[in-house]
Amino acid sequence: MFATMNDESDLDITPSSSKTAEENLGDYLRGNREKKRIKLQHISLQTKINHTILEQLEKNDVHNLPGKTYVRGFVRTYCKMLDIDPDLGVQYLNQLYGITTNIEPTPLDDVRGKAPGKSISFLLLDHKKENLIFLSLVVIVAIAVLGYNKFQTTRQKVDSHIKVKSEVLSAQTPLKSTPSIVDSIKITQTKKMAIQSVVKEERKQEQKQEQEREQEQEKKPEITLRPIKLPMYTFHPKNDFEKLPKKIRSSFSDERETIYLIAEQSDLWLTYKRDDQEIKKVLIKMGGNLLITGQEIRLLLGNVNGAKIYYQRHLLSFNSRSSVKNVVFPVASANNFRIPLFIFDKRAGSVSTSEHLQQE
């Protein structure tokens, strides 16, 4: 299936203004982390969550976070990393969005009181075993019921095809002999063949429906191409270009487009194309860097808020709430392209440009 990555997606975030709810989420995450003496950078490395997003969670700043579904997953992952109750973390998050929930953490004393001598992990394990046994029994019973119903349905279909001829008896009606064992066997075989015919027909219908579903899934989704919104970026007021190594600074030239990327706070993935060369996909691990030069460069950046990007000796600043950004250098070439700049085919494992889609 085809998928696109856009940086200008509409996010429906309506956070609550309750000061108590905002204080509770940040205090819950930050307090437990500091209690265990774990740095925020270590949490980001282990959970693969952007460092900036983690900071915003601890500050109760939901205005600049992605959609609610993603944020709820971040909170659960963060809580599991700290070995604290993820349901309580989600409750605090829901309060920030103005959603009332009845989730309450189970006190440790109550749990220990119900099963003396057992730890919470053993109690949870016991519940999981009981749930697994119960679910297995439910599945077995459901399969048996479905099989029986299907058998009865098939039998009814066969019986409906066998018509019984009624006959009025009179004194002149000749007597008929009782069917022999051979005749009974023939009738049984006829019923069996009728059942097999009905089953084959049902299988053909199921195969046809499965093929139609596969064909429907293989259809390409409708992709809407949109012009690039300007400005794509701004120059950071605190430019520290002179602090870069001399070898890197000497690589910049006014005769060509030069971009230097540093994965400073998190991993940075990007897809880019320069001039007429082929498309490249790169993952820069945190602390790594990459230098790109050319006359015309197209970039799709992921986790852009955790990176430092220098262009023509200037440090850039991006306003991307989703941490994904489409950028074209130089700016004058932006009108020649549409976003998404790149189209990804997950099924084929390939990537192409938006111009290729327009040509099709």
Image (tube, rainbow, N blue to C red):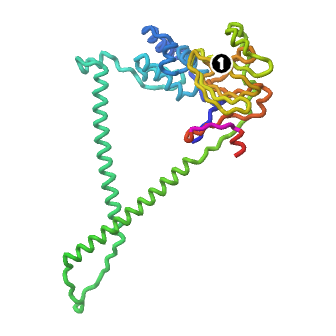
On screen, residue 280 versus residue 159, left or right, reads right
Identify whether 239 is placed above or below 80: above
Q: Amino acid at mark 1?
A: Leu
On screen, residue 18 versus residue 325, left or right, reads left
Q: Residues within 10 Å of mark 1 (few under 14, many from 20)?
A: some
Identify whether 199 is placed above or below 250: below
User: Residue, x 30% and y 67% (percent of image)?
Assistant: 192
User: Residue, x 19% and y 80% (percent of image)?
Assistant: 178
Can residue 106 be seen from the camera position used here? yes
Report the number of discs: 1
Disc 1 is placed on an element classified as strand
In the orientation shown, which residue stands out farthest toward the bottom? 172
Quadrant showing the N terminus: top right
Quarter-of-image position of residue 188 = bottom left
User: Residue, x 67% and y 19% (percent of image)?
Assistant: 291
- What's the magenta region? 349-354
| Residue 300 in picture, x, y percent from top left | 65, 28
Residue 350 located within the stretch drawn in magenta:
yes
Residue 189 located within the stretch drawn in magenta:
no
Identify whether 193 is placed above or below 94: below
**What residue does disc 1 label?**
261
| Residue 296 in picture, x, y percent from top left | 75, 28
- Given residues 174 and 244, the one toward you in this image is 244
